[in-house]
Amino acid sequence: MVEATGEKIPLKIYAILFVSFLSVLSIVGQITILGKQVYDITGRELDLGLLGLAEFAPTFLLAPFTGSLADRMDRRILFLWALLGEGVVSITLFWYATTKPTSVLPIFGLVIIFGVCRAFAAPSGRALAVDMSPVSTVPRVVAFSSISFQSGLIIGPVLFGFLFVAYEPLPYLVSAICLGLGAFILIFVPSSKIQRLETTGAKNALADALEGFKFIRRTPMLFGAISLDLAAVLFGGAVALLPAIAEDRLGVGAVGLGWLRAAVGIGAGAVAITLAIRPLNRNIGKILLSVVAVFGLGTIVLGLSRNYALAFVAVLILSGADAVSMFIRATLVPLATPGHMRGRVLALENVFIGASNELGAFESGVTAALMGLTGAIIFGGAGTLAVVVIWWFCFPVLRKVDRFDEVQTFNEEHSD
């Protein structure tokens, strides 16, 4: 348990966390409904995978450059404009949904544009709260950030599921309103005082962008933690198949799907609240690997389930385990990264961690088309367990991490 420092978290941090909540609520709620609509139009699991790929591709291609940009300019302003761009896409999705669409191609195109905006929003938005927090409060800020994130995961799918039943295009309009409100709030948040990179010209832009990757690659602790999530979620992306599971295996509609998708946030939210009260501070590396194994086991149970209650519990368990691993990585990465490099490192981390969900969704869609729904999910869970075993032996420095203050010491020793 982390000892209380007595240092208060600044009010501006709570404003940023509320903006993050609005962003997550909009993104997760909207993608849940998009999955429902895409599956209603085509009835193919592969299209759910392609939807995930459409989300992932912009982040994968742009992350090194958007991270460098986040280190060069005011991250608050970059985050604000990215949210406005996402809002414009949501408004366009609202309009398209009113036309009673029969083609998924425009949806894929708009999701790609939305992914471009997310590629800019992720490194700037994720770095803001840490930038403005005293070092001693970072673990608590990360815990509160996790609560904000998981609250969006819970409320978004449930709310948007009911909105979809009331009027199918309505979720996209609500998403646009929430994103616009988040951008408006950021206008009143002061800029951080983190030192920014000087502009060195276009010819050095690529070198600056690659510096974040070089830092991660030469830091085995960071590389192991970040790549662990990519490999694990690449196999364990069964959540993307929930529209097919709800329709074909469980026989429930949009509201049932919304609650099943919300189980991701409920399980993770309960863990996040627990970690905010009693943060982890010992055996960090071993706990990280252990909870990823629990995530894999929960995925296998979900693949075997034909009962709604059992499927709901399986999602609760796997998402709770994922929340613990998310808390550890979200605390470890910024603490081990110098402030002037956080934009680049967090942008690349977003490729490995945030975008791994979309890449995992693509993998799940493809394997479901080849192996069937049940086979794909069980294969993914087994693959996650294999990843844990491999990482246990290949990254001993990660396994041996005991306390977060060790990570802070590492940062201080390697920040020059």
Image (cartoon, rainbow, N blue to C red):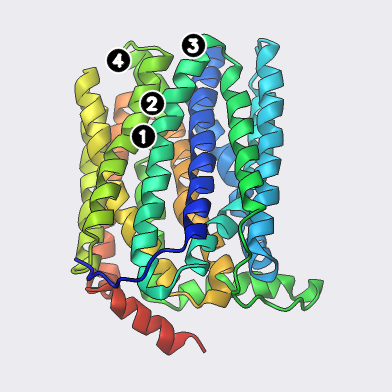
Specify whether residue 319 is in view. no
| Disc 3 to disc 4, C-alpha distance | 18 Å
Kind of residue indicated by mark 1: Ala
Name which of mark 3 and mark 4 comes first in the sequence.
3
From the image, tell me which residue sits under label 2.
242
| Disc 1 to disc 4, C-alpha distance | 15 Å
* Pointers 2 and 1 in contact (C-beta within 8 Å): yes
| Disc 2 to disc 1, C-alpha distance | 7 Å
Q: Residue, x 26% and y 29% (percent of image)?
A: 303
From the image, tell me which residue sits under label 3.
165
Name which of mark 1 and mark 4 comes first in the sequence.
1
* Pointers 1 and 3 in contact (C-beta within 8 Å): no
Q: Identify the mark at residue 250; answer none if there is no mark.
A: 4
**In the image, residue 308 above or below residue 136:** above
From the image, tell me which residue sits under label 1.
238
Q: Position of residue 217 (x, y in %)?
A: 47, 73
Q: Position of residue 67 (x, y in %)?
A: 62, 63
Image position of 317 (left or right of 262): left
Q: Decide: few, some or many residues near mark 4? Use Cα within 10 Å; few <14, some 14-19, many ≥20.
A: some
Q: Position of residue 151 (x, y in %)?
A: 39, 39
